[in-house]
Image (tube, rainbow, N blue to C red):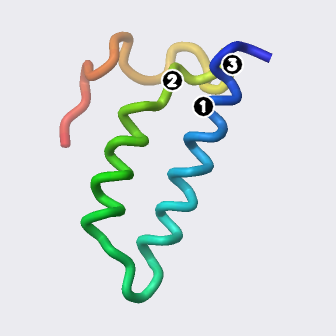
Amino acid sequence: MCPNCEDFVVTVAMLGQLALYAETPGADLDFADVVGNALALSLPEPPPGLFPPGDGPEFPGEGWTP
């Protein structure tokens, strides 16, 4: 297994759990927003082969608009 594969999988799982939490009644949405952004920024490079080659921008941030 690649060195960052486990980190990637665990971080994506935490993002999923956070998304479920944010949908529960009474959830602290400010908390979910801050933690979600921090988790997303901490994602390591995706494991090799996760995305097909040639899809998406060549460089991070290129071609992305909100």
Marks 1 and 3 close (CB-CB < 8 Å): no
Looking at the image, which residue sits at the far bottom? Answer: 25
Would you identify the image quadrant in which residue 39 lies?
A: top left
Can you tell which of label 2 and label 3 is closer to the viewer?
2
**Label 1 crowd (10 A; few <14 / some 14-19 / many >=20):** some
**Percent x, y of residue 30:** 25, 66
**Percent x, y of residue 31:** 31, 63
Instruction: Kindly report the distance in space between the C-alpha atoms of the residues bearing marks 2 and 1.
Output: 6 Å
Label 3: which secondary element: loop
Amino acid identity at mark 2? Pro
At 37% across and 86% down in the image, what residue appears?
26
Amino acid identity at mark 3? Gly
Which label is found at residue 44?
2
Of 58 and 35, the residue lying toward us: 35
Relative to residue 43, is residue 60 depicted above or below?
above
Instruction: Kindly report the distance in space between the C-alpha atoms of the residues bearing marks 2 and 3.
Output: 14 Å
**Percent x, y of residue 8:** 60, 31
Of 58 and 60, the residue lying toward us: 60
Label 1: which secondary element: helix
Marks 2 and 1 close (CB-CB < 8 Å): yes
Instruction: Name which of mark 2 and mark 1 comes first in the sequence.
Output: 1
Q: Is residue 17 left or right of residue 37?
A: right
Relative to residue 19, is residue 43 depicted above or below?
above
